[in-house]
Amino acid sequence: MGTGMTDDAEPRLRIGEVAEQAGVSTRTLRYYQELGLLNPARSSPGGGRRYSARDVARLDRILELRDVMGFDLDRIKAILHGEDRLAELRQEVLAGVSRERRKDVIVEAVTINNGMRTQVGERLEVLHSFLTELETKAAYYHQTARDLNIKFPGGALPARAAAAAGLTT
Amino acid sequence: MGTGMTDDAEPRLRIGEVAEQAGVSTRTLRYYQELGLLNPARSSPGGGRRYSARDVARLDRILELRDVMGFDLDRIKAILHGEDRLAELRQEVLAGVSRERRKDVIVEAVTINNGMRTQVGERLEVLHSFLTELETKAAYYHQTARDLNIKFPGGALPARAAAAAGLTT
DNA sequence: TTGCTCCTCACGTCACGTGAGGTGGC
DNA sequence: TTGCTCCTCACGTCACGTGAGGTGGC
C-alpha cells in the first residue's frame, strides 16, 4: 500500500504466446478456463484473452501438478484452491483473522504437502529401480553386440536416441 | 528341446484374477486385447479368456511403461514389438541367423534403451527438484504453525496424509 | 436351481485435437 | 485490402468406465 509498487503487472500476453511458452495448445488454455482452473486476468475489447505474469505462473503450477504428479484436473483444482486460500490467509493475517480459520488453512496445506511428499518419494523409488533395470539391460545389449562384433553408428548417442524413442514430437 | 521342461506353463488364470492382481479393470484387459497389445494364451470352450504366467508378465511390463514412463499404448506396442523381436533373436541365434538381422535388432534395442534412460534421468531430476520445493514449503508451514501456536493432530502422519490427499481410491 | 464370473455390444467420460466459419487490430 | 491471430461451436479421439442383457461351469 502506497509503496510505489504496482502489485499486478498489466496483463499483456495473448493466448498464443502463453501456449507456446508453456508447450501446450490454445485449446488447452480455453479448456482450463472452461473448468475454472485458469481465468485470464482480462480480455481485450475485441474479445481476445489477456494473461498476466501471475496467470502464467499459475499455468506452470497446473502443468507441474499434471505432468510431475499425474493428477487429474479435478484434483489439481482442489489443490490450487487450497493454495489460493493460503495466499488469502497471508493477506488477512496482517488485518487479523480468527485463530480457528488460520489453523484450518494451515492444517489443510500441511496435509496436502505431506501427501504429495510421500507420493513423490514413492515415484522416485519406482523410477530409480526402473533406471537400474534399464542399465542392466544396456550392459547386456552391449556385451551381446561385442560378442557379435557389432559397432554402433556413433558412441553413446543419448540425444539422438531420445529423439528416436519419440519424445520429440 | 527335449530337456524335460515344459516351456509354457498351462494358462489357468481368468481375466478377473489377472485384473485384480494387476490393479486394473477387466475392461482394460479386453481393450488391450482389442489393440493387439496382450492376447491371452488361450480361451476356455465357453469363451472365457485364460492367461498364462507369461501373459501376466507382459501385462506388468505394459503397465510399467504406461505408469512409469507415461507412454501411450501405440508407443508401448512398438517397444514390446522390439522386445519380442529380441526374444526371437535369442532363439534364432542358436540356429544361426544372418549377421545383418542380428545387428538391426540389437541396434534397435539399444536405441530404445538409450532413449528411455535419458527420459528416466530427466524425470528423476524433475521429481527431485519438486521434492526439494515441497520440503521447503513444509518447513515454512511448520514455522508458521509454530508462530501461531498451532499443534497438528498427530506428528508427521505421512500415511494418513497420503490417504487424505486421495491416492488411495 | 442358485450364485458367481464370464461374455458382447454400446453409450458415457475425461482431456483435449482438429477443423469450420467468422471477426478484429496492425 | 491483406495477413495474422483471435473467437466460438462442434465433432473426433484415446483410454478406458459403466451399465444392459445374456451365457456357462461348480
Image (cartoon, coloured by chain):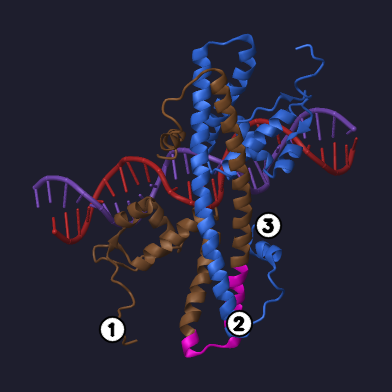
Chain colours: A brown, B blue, C red, D purple
| Residue type, mark 1 in image | Gly
Let me know if residue A107 appears in the view: yes
Q: Is residue A166 above or below residue A45?
A: above
Marks 1/2: CA–CA distance:
33 Å
Residue B17's label in the rendered image is: none
Q: Which element carries disc 3, helix, strand or loop?
A: loop
Amino acid on which disc 2 is placed: Arg
**Mark 2 belongs to which subunit?**
B
**Residue carrying label 2:** B146
Question: What is the chain identity of the residue bearing mark 1?
Answer: A
The chain holding disc 3 is: B
Per the picture, the main secondary structure of the magenta-coloured stretch is helix
Magenta region: A93-112
- CA gap between label 3 and label 1 equals 49 Å
- Residue D4's place in the image compared with B72, above or below, is below
Q: Is A109 in the magenta?
A: yes
Kind of element beneath mark 2: helix
CB atoms of marks 3 and 2 within 8 Å: no
Query: Looking at the image, is mark 3 or mark 2 nearer the viewer?
Result: 2
Q: Which label's residue is closer to the chain start, 3 or 2?
A: 2
Would you identify the image quadrant in which residue B165 lies? Answer: bottom right
Q: What quarter of the picture does the C terminus of chain B occupy? A: bottom right
Q: Amino acid at mark 3?
A: Thr
How dense is the environment of label 2, judged by Cα within 10 Å: few (below 14), some, or many (20 and up)? few
Which image quadrant is residue B146 in?
A: bottom right
Frontmost residue, C23 versus A98: A98
Q: Position of residue A122 (x, y in %)?
A: 64, 53
| Mark 3 Cα shell of 10 Å, populated few (<14), some (14-19), many (≥20) | few
Q: Judge if badges 1 and 2 mark residues of a common chain.
A: no
Query: Mark 3 sits on what residue?
Result: B168
On the image, numbered disc 1 is attached to which residue?
Answer: A4
